Amino acid sequence: MVSSWHADVVVIGAGIIGASVAWHLAKKKVDVLVLEKSDPCSGTSGACDGMVFLQSKKPGVHLALAMAGRNRFDTLEQELDADIALQCSGGIMAITSEAELTAVNWFVQEQNQAGLGVSLLDIRQARELAPCLSPNLPGATFCSLDARVNPIYLTLAFLEAAERCGTRVLSRTPVMGIGLKTDGIFVLDTPQKTIETRTIVNAAGVHAPKIGKMVGLDIPITPRRGQILVTGPMAPVLDQCLISAAYVAAKYDPAIAESGHMGISMEQTEAGNFLLGSTREFVGFDRSTTLTAVKHILAETTAIIPALQDASLMRTFAGLRPYTPDGLPILGRVPSLPGFIMAAGHEGDGIALSPVTGQLIAELITDGTTCINLTPFCLERFSNGAVS
């Protein structure tokens, strides 16, 4: 017999965003129930790298949000009482052509004007910082604020800290339907229980549109596959996290991503393994990996770090980023359903934006206002002609 539960807030999704929202609410003594259709961190948050990379964000509201999020990482391990494998050794953006050098020069100026602090380096300066870089590169940029974490450690740390504050987490509990009573109470149907709440947070990532349809909402989030290669352990050669300049272009322009010249990302773990990525493919919910992508990633990464030619390939995996048409997450209340709150669509920025997203959603629910204006991130921006 299906039983019934009640919670002040139901968070749908136990990836890094849902976990952060749950913890920030639990700290404020809110009764939170997290529903996860599979297991915590079994989706996008468990199939990605751990970069907290600011250089890839467009100057404006996106970069401002990311910088606010980065500030939270300095004290996060202490707050969560957990090891999240935080490494604050900065980030490098490798420039692979003269055309990229011209474009990056403008991008760096914009970021510095926004207060980020990015240095444009010639190849000699870049190789002083990271001798593993190819001497054939035109140059690179460096930002000391770029960092990395273990995304699985961080997601589970958020959830465990939330549970210590009283949050309930139900794994393998998919939401099958959502009803709305005349008194404004949502009724969520699951295989195990019927759950009633006045507030739902849709943190379901690439599955957020399915949840939206249950309440009559069209949520423009599309899965975008990213394939990643894992090498065997190597001697330490790269202390920083690294992306190519083409990564930024491919991130914001799908045509570039599909043209065959994709940007790449690299980080070397404490164990010596490299994580090499990543594609940006619209292939539905297909999480398989392809030989074409493996060859492409290896060609692009070895051109930047020649020592990778001696690396052994240990395994490959793929995750699905929750892509939105303008590259910004969808955050905040839905005006037509005041008790329904969005916290999804972070694409490849979920790790970096997780602390600030959780903070903002918790402020919205408990205080009715937020320290950062959420209007640029509202769902209705897509129906007001702002994005084609």
Image (spheres, rainbow, N blue to C red):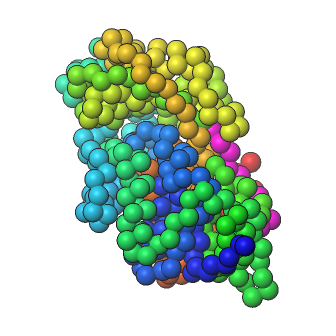
| In the image: residue 95, left or right of residue 347 | left
| In the image: residue 178, left or right of residue 264 | right
Report the front residue among 2 and 45: 2
Q: Residue at x 43, y 39 (%)?
A: 49
Using the rendered view, name the quadrant where residue 101 is placed: top left
Q: Residue at x 53, y 58 (%)?
A: 14
Q: Is residue 165 visible?
A: yes
- Residue 109: x and y, percent? 38, 41
Q: Which residues are magenta?
A: 215-224
Magenta-drawn stretch, dominant element (helix, strand or loop): loop
In the image, is residue 220 above or below residue 340? above
Using the rendered view, name the quadrant where residue 173 is placed: bottom right
Q: Residue at x 23, y 22 (%)?
A: 235
Q: Residue at x 75, y 88 (%)?
A: 183
| In the image: residue 248, left or right of residue 151 | right
Quarter of the image with the N terminus in it: bottom right
